[in-house]
Image (cartoon, rainbow, N blue to C red):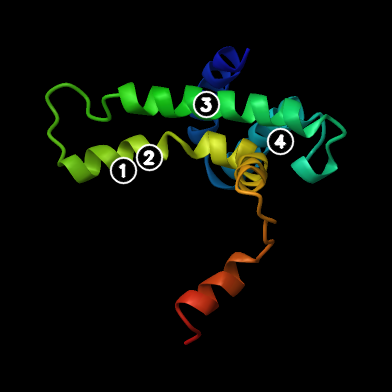
């Protein structure tokens, strides 16, 4: 099921990235919302009424599909040379789908298997804690 969803997502997102201005961002957000709705049966993980274990199974499947695709994807077109770092960055960018759609569920799953409580933190607060304020 998620293999087909991921292929559809990639096609939809490719079309969205061809748009310009705000319509590009609006369409990309709509696409992400679509797949969150499929996974969670709700707009966000926290709002889902699905059983957590059911979501975890699907989120892990998405992770495996996306990272498998990225690992097997040649990020350079034939005849183009890229450094190993550029190649890995290209592959990593292919993984945004799993984190944008299933990230909260995967983080919760990991916390649970570690017997830990997840910590909700704004990225700006974390940045200030790690980097400091200017």
Dot placed on the residue nearer the N-terminal end, 3 or 4: 3
Q: Secondary structure at mark 3?
A: helix
Toward which corner of the image does residue 69 lie, by quadrant? top left
Q: Quote the CA–CA distance across marks 3 and 4.
A: 16 Å
Q: Residue furthest right?
A: 49
Residue position marked by numbered label 3 in the rendering: 15
Above or below, comparing residue 42 to residue 73 in the picture: below
> 10 or 67: which is nearer to us?
67
Residue position marked by numbered label 1 in the rendering: 89
Residue position marked by numbered label 2 in the rendering: 92
How packed mark 4 is, by other alpha carbons closer than 10 Å (few <14, some 14-19, many 20 or more), is some
> 28 or 132: which is nearer to us?
132
Q: Residue furthest bottom?
A: 134
Q: Is residue 19 visible?
A: no
Above or below, comparing residue 9 to residue 117 in the picture: above
How packed mark 3 is, by other alpha carbons closer than 10 Å (few <14, some 14-19, many 20 or more), is few
Q: Quote the CA–CA distance across marks 2 and 1.
A: 5 Å
Q: Quote the CA–CA distance across marks 1 and 3.
A: 22 Å
User: Which residue corresponds to the image point at 12% horizontal and 34% vertical from the top-left?
Assistant: 81
User: Which residue corresponds to the image point at 43% horizontal and 29% vertical from the top-left?
Assistant: 67
Dot placed on the residue nearer the N-terminal end, 2 or 4: 4
Which quarter of the figure is the N terminus placed in? top right
Q: Nearer the viewer, mark 3 or mark 2?
A: 2
Q: Residue 107 at x, y = what percent?
A: 61, 46
How packed mark 1 is, by other alpha carbons closer than 10 Å (few <14, some 14-19, many 20 or more), is few
């Amino acid at each position: 099921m998620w293999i087909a969803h991921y292929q559809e997502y990639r096609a939809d997102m490719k079309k969205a990235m061809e748009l310009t201005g705000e319509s590009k961002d609006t369409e990309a957000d709509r696409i992400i919302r679509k797949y969150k709705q499929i996974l969670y049966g709700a707009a966000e993980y926290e709002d889902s009424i699905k059983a957590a274990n059911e979501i975890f199974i699907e989120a892990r499947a998405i992770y495996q599909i996306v990272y498998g695709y990225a690992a097997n994807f040649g990020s350079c077109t034939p005849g183009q040379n890229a450094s190993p770092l550029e190649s890995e960055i290209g592959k990593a960018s292919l993984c945004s789908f799993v984190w944008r759609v299933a990230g909260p569920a995967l983080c919760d799953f990991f916390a649970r298997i570690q017997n830990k409580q997840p910590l909700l933190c704004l990225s700006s607060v974390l940045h200030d804690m790690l980097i400091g304020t200017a």
